[in-house]
Amino acid sequence: MGEWTRFEPGDRAPNDGVYIEDGEDSFHMGIENPQKVKLQKGERFPATTNKNRKWKRMPK
């Protein structure tokens, strides 16, 4: 199947890394001051600042 790319608050991180908030309009308009979190594999994602946002892994 493949690995998920967007995660809900409460999901577990599949890998170590820095994750950033992603929103429905982020591709076109961007998100001002998105939250960033550094998680270890297996840690849970925290709540987002908006119910329409999800977490995605930050590009290197």
Image (cartoon, rainbow, N blue to C red):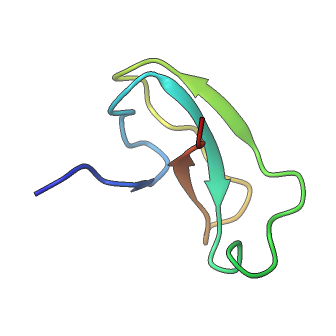
The structure residue drawn at horizontal position 60% and vertical position 42%, both measured from the top left corner, is 58
Please provide percent x and percent y for residue 5: 39, 55
In the displayed structure, 37 sits above or below 41; it is: below
Q: Residue furthest front?
A: 60
Q: Residue furthest top?
A: 40
Task: Write down the quadrant of residue 42 in the picture.
Answer: top left
In the displayed structure, 46 sits above or below 54; it is: above
In the displayed structure, 39 sits above or below 45; it is: above
Task: Write down the quadrant of residue 20 in the picture.
Answer: top right
Q: Is residue 28 left or right of residue 42?
A: right
Q: Is residue 51 left or right of residue 50?
A: left
Please provide percent x and percent y for residue 47: 61, 46
In the displayed structure, 58 sits above or below 49; it is: above
For the C terminus, the image quarter is top right
Q: Residue furthest right?
A: 32
The structure residue drawn at horizontal position 52% and vertical position 50%, both measured from the top left corner, is 56
The structure residue drawn at horizontal position 65% and vertical position 31%, both measured from the top left corner, is 37
For the N terminus, the image quarter is bottom left
The structure residue drawn at horizontal position 49% and vertical position 48%, both measured from the top left corner, is 9
Q: Nearer the viewer, residue 26 or 50?
A: 26
How many marks the image carries: the answer is: 0
Q: Nearer the viewer, residue 10 or 33?
A: 33
Q: Nearer the viewer, residue 12 or 60?
A: 60
Please provide percent x and percent y for residue 24: 62, 78
